[in-house]
Structure formats: structure tokens, C-alpha cells
Image (spheres, helix red, strand yellow):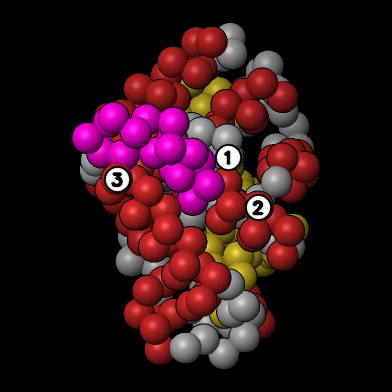
Amino acid sequence: MNHEQLSAIAHTHHPVKAPLDDESVRRLLEQGLPRGDERILDLGCGGGEWLLRALEAHPRLHAEGVDISPDALDLARRNALRRGVGDRLALHHRSAGEFSSPHAFDLVLSVGASHAFGGLLPTLAAAREHLAPGGRVLIGDGFWDREPSPEAVEMLGDFADLATTVDRVVAEGWTPVYGHVSTRAELDAYEWACWGTIASWALDHPDDPDSAQALETAAARRSEWLHVYRDTFGFLTLLLRRTAD
């Protein structure tokens, strides 16, 4: 079973691929879409859940998503049709870093996808290339809530603490106009959902040739979370505007 297949199973009951609950997602989108008729872009959209929820909430909205996974884009396309918003969603199968568009966007999202650009600040630089004057960027990435172990840094990346993360964003010419720090409940719910869903799938499909691998993966990832990074990792989602262009 490859990574995409595991990810699809893991997010069956938590389609937003980040540690945010439904109310947090709703509130962030509400702040990011003050008019309700914006054109929005998600760089690294995966299954497109952020875009689908925005389109459902705002019938005058138009959205585009970019991702390298054809399976994720197929899922987004099917769900968009099922939820009645397919006519206002365009999906692009390509690297987010290579995407170009003839028009700019009022809101550019990239939540939990900074690895595709090499970190938070490169992600912001990429988002800026697509941003209309006066537009907003909604970005989510990790930070260290406490001093991490070397093992945690090697596993998840070289994040900064919360204050330093925000300071670095501001130093690049961005002004936070809203934000959300994921709660312990959101962080835990996300991890339990991902690894519990994979484990349940394995137990429900004992004759599948991938069942043993899936169960081992769920156990290993659950152990890494509990023993390596649960007490140190945090997640920050920021709504940003340019300080000056």
C-alpha cells in the first residue's frame, strides 16, 4: 500500500488534512472570505476539503486547486459533484510550485503543505505570486510548543517556536489579521482519527494483502506521536495580508 492510499484511508473521518476541527475551519474561511464572491486558490489542495467547504458556504465563489496526486484530485472532483459545487471548481494536476494562472486570486490557501515548497517562508513567497492586490493568504504550518528532542526535529522538521514563527512571517512583509493555534483537543483528535482509521481498516480487512502493513503503520505512527512529538508539536494557521506592496 503506497503513501497516497494510506493517506486516503487515514483521512476518511477527518477530511481536512490538518489538526483543525470543523468550527475552526469555518471561522478561518469566514474571516478569509469577507465578501463571499472571491476567487480562491489552494496550493496543495489534496482532496479539496477547504475549497469544498468554502464553495458550499458561498454560492458566488469560484475556486481552483492544485495538487500532484491524481487520486486526491479525483476524490475532490467526485465530492464536488456530489455536493453540488462542481461547476465552480477547477482542479489542476501539477506541482504547486510550477502552477501559473492568467488571473490573480483574492484568497490563496496552503494549509499543511509547506513541505511542497521547502518551508513556511518559501510557501508564502509562492502564494504571493498568485495574490490579487488587497488579497489574503491562509497558511497553516507547525511550530514547536516546547523544546523538541532531536528525534522530533528529524521526524517533523526544523520548526521555530510560536513567537519566532510569527516574527519571521511579519519580517517578510506580512501582517496577521487573524489566526488560530490548534488546541490540544484538535491535535489529539487529528492523530487518533488518522491512525485509528488505518487500524480499523486493517482489522476490517484481514484478508487484504495490505492489511498487515497497514496495521503495522498505524501502530508505528501512533507510537511516534505519543513518544516523540505529542508534547512538543503545535500547529498555527494564519490569515495574512501584505503590509506593503
The residue at which mark 1 appears reads as 14
Q: Is residue 208 magenta?
A: yes
Q: Secondary structure at mark 3?
A: helix
Q: Earlier in the sequence, mark 1 or mark 3?
A: 1
Label 1 amino acid? His
Q: Residue at x 35, y 54 (%)?
A: 217
Q: Which residues are magenta?
A: 195-211
Q: Is 123 placed left or right of 117 in the picture?
A: right
* Residue 189 tag number: 2
Label 3 amino acid? Ala
Q: Are marks 2 and 1 in contact (CB under 8 Å)?
A: yes
Q: Earlier in the sequence, mark 2 or mark 3?
A: 2
Q: How many marks?
A: 3
Q: Is residue 216 above or below residue 98?
A: below
* Residue 212 tag number: 3
Q: Quadrant of the C terminus?
A: bottom right
Q: Is 149 placed left or right of 56 in the picture?
A: left
Label 2 amino acid? Ala
Mark 2 Cα-neighbour bin, 10 Å: few <14, some 14–19, many ≥20: some
Q: Is residue 128 above or below residue 59?
A: below
